[in-house]
Amino acid sequence: MRLLLMADTHVPTRARLLPEPLLDAVDAADVVFHAGDWVDAETLDVLQQRSRRLVAVYGNNDGPELRARLPLVAEVELQSCRFAVVHETGPAKGREQRCEAEFPGVDVLVFGHSHIPWDSHAPGGMRLLNPGSPTDRRRQPYATYLTASLEDGRLGDVRVHELPRRG
């Protein structure tokens, strides 16, 4: 199973549209995760139309329309692997322990907000993944998203994809 993880798309405030390489990855994915800060509902519509399956939440920059259509936290089980998606997890210091306590029984937590790619493990084994942002790199050298594979309930081949800088 091919997974695509993204967050903090911020369309149209940081980009007019989602980058084409990201949309190509959406088309190839079996499941797309979006960890909030869409800004516009049109981007949600695009991903709902193009995704085979979309698991998504709203973020702090999302207004009433997106909050009405999306949850604060989404949970899904794929091949016996439990995923949770949330926008904010608080400061980096202590994140693993805090998230493990807040999301017991979750195998993989997908989050956003910082625009900084993150891949770590909590003491009990939970994997924490932040795909960064495909449109607003902030202090990062590149805008990013993540892909991963899921086989027999095991997450593998987690990869950060760097997007070309916009001209």
Image: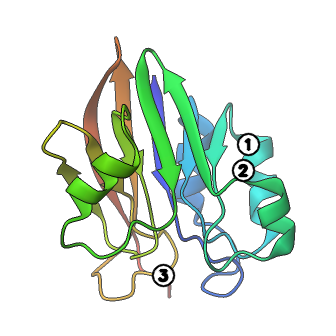
Residue 45 sits above or below residue 7 on the image? above
Which disc, if any, is residue 50? Answer: 1
- Helix or strand or loop: what does disc 1 sit on? helix
- Helix or strand or loop: what does disc 3 sit on? loop
Image location (x, y in percent) of residue 98? 28, 58
The residue positioned 61% from the left and 69% from the top of the image is 59
The residue positioned 59% from the left and 70% from the top of the image is 9
Residue position for label 2: 47
Asked if marks 3 and 2 touch (Cβ < 8 Å), the reply is no
User: What residue type is disc 1 on?
Assistant: Arg
User: What residue type is disc 3 on?
Assistant: Asp
16 or 153: nearer the viewer: 153
Asked if marks 1 and 3 touch (Cβ < 8 Å), the reply is no
- Closer to the N terminus: mark 1 or mark 3? 1
Question: Which scheme is used to colour this image of the protein?
Answer: rainbow
Q: CA distance from mark 3 to mark 2?
A: 18 Å
Residue position for label 3: 136
Q: CA distance from mark 1 to mark 3?
A: 22 Å
Q: Residues within 10 Å of mark 1 (few under 14, many from 20)?
A: some
Q: Quadrant of residue 11?
A: bottom right
Asked if marks 1 and 2 touch (Cβ < 8 Å), the reply is yes
